[in-house]
């Protein structure tokens, strides 16, 4: 679906829908807020292919000459240490994690994949590698093969095909939702423009957006914007409080995207713990996986 330059949205992936004009979304047991925590396990390559692309704002130390042990080791901390800390905190608060795993992690870290499954995580697609974003510079054939490589790697590693998708650095081309739908993906987390799920358009079957709150992405807040960690905790709590208030009239979604190499550091994890405690001690909060949220939305759409 090529992009068109026109007023407002220059694409036709979904219908514009102001939340003030929608029907009422009710979560299970009339919960006000559905909470989904996505944890990224992504692998930066030593030497990416020459035709690959990644944003220079991917987070972590700046690139240096090969071998770049400091930068790559900084990111690998998440696979070696941070992930276990983050999963422990989520389990403490009764939050089922949704773990986004790329093909290279799935193929080279089988212990991590099994550990996430043992902790009850839903595993979703996360591309091939951090250093290989989807862009419109790809041909349709190349993008289709890229998606298939990611889905096949996770299917082989976990025994089942992923239902969800979060592109590396939220990267998409103008045709990505349709290609994901064709590959059997049922929801995608790349669209960060709402506080409720919503349907995307595809001729290949149903696919939904599960919007992440991008300004609460820990890389965006802590690394890109240099928000103080104490202030980051407060942002999560303040954001939740407003969603909780608004959710009394119409159900809201809080989807947090976290990176273990960053939030899993020993001097940061306590702030996440306290923020989640603030959220989960309230009544009317439904903590669920991405698939659980999308399945509920599909079967219980907003009503007038």
Image: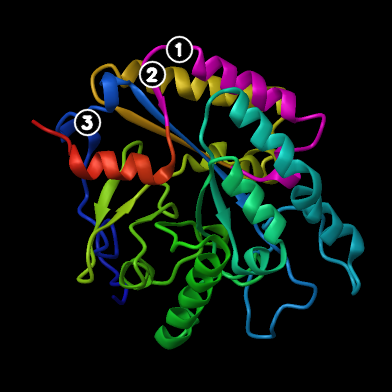
The span from disc 1 to disc 2 (Cα, nearest Å) is 9 Å
Is the Cβ of the residue at disc 1 closer than 8 Å to that at disc 2?
yes
Q: Quadrant of residue 107?
A: bottom right
The span from disc 1 to disc 3 (Cα, nearest Å) is 19 Å
In the image, 65 versus 152, the foreground residue is 152
- Return the mark for residue 158: none
Is the Cβ of the residue at disc 3 closer than 8 Å to that at disc 2?
no
Q: Is residue 228 above or below residue 161?
A: above
- Direction from residue 202 to residue 107 in the image, left or right: right
Q: Earlier in the sequence, mark 1 or mark 2?
A: 2
Q: Is residue 203 above or below residue 114?
A: below
- Return the mark for residue 244: 2
* Secondary structure state at the residue bearing disc 3: loop
Q: Quadrant of the N terminus?
A: bottom left
> Percent x, y for residue 149?
52, 76
Magenta stretch: give its range: 258-287
Q: Mark 3 highlights which residue? A: 25
Q: Is residue 235 above or below residue 11?
A: above
């Amino acid at each position: 679906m090529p992009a068109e330059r026109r007023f407002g949205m220059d694409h036709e992936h979904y219908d514009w829908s102001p939340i003030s004009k929608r029907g009422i979304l009710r979560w299970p047991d009339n919960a006000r807020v559905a909470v989904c925590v996505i944890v990224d396990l992504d692998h930066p390559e030593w030497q990416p292919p020459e035709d690959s692309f990644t944003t220079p704002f991917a987070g972590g130390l700046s690139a240096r000459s090969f071998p770049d042990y400091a930068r790559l080791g900084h990111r690998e901390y998440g696979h070696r240490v941070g992930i276990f800390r983050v999963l422990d905190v989520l389990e403490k608060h009764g939050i089922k994690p949704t773990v986004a795993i790329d093909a290279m992690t799935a193929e080279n870290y089988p212990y991590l994949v099994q550990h996430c499954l043992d902790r009850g995580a839903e595993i979703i697609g996360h591309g091939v590698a951090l250093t290989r974003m989807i862009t419109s510079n790809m041909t349709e054939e190349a993008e289709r093969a890229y998606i298939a490589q990611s889905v096949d790697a996770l299917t082989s590693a976990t025994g089942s095909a992923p239902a969800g998708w979060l592109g590396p650095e939220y990267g998409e081309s103008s045709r990505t939702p349709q290609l994901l739908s064709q590959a059997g993906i049922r929801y995608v987390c790349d669209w960060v423009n709402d506080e409720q799920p919503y349907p995307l358009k595809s001729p290949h079957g149903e696919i939904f957006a599960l919007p992440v709150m991008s300004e609460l992405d820990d890389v965006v807040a802590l690394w890109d914007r240099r928000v103080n960690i104490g202030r980051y905790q407060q942002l999560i709590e303040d954001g939740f409080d407003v969603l909780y208030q608004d959710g009394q009239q119409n159900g809201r979604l809080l989807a947090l995207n976290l990176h273990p190499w960053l939030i899993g550091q020993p001097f940061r994890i306590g702030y996440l713990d306290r923020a989640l405690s603030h959220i989960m001690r309230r009544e009317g909060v439904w903590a669920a996986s991405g698939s659980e949220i999308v399945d509920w939305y599909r079967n219980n759409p907003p009503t007038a």
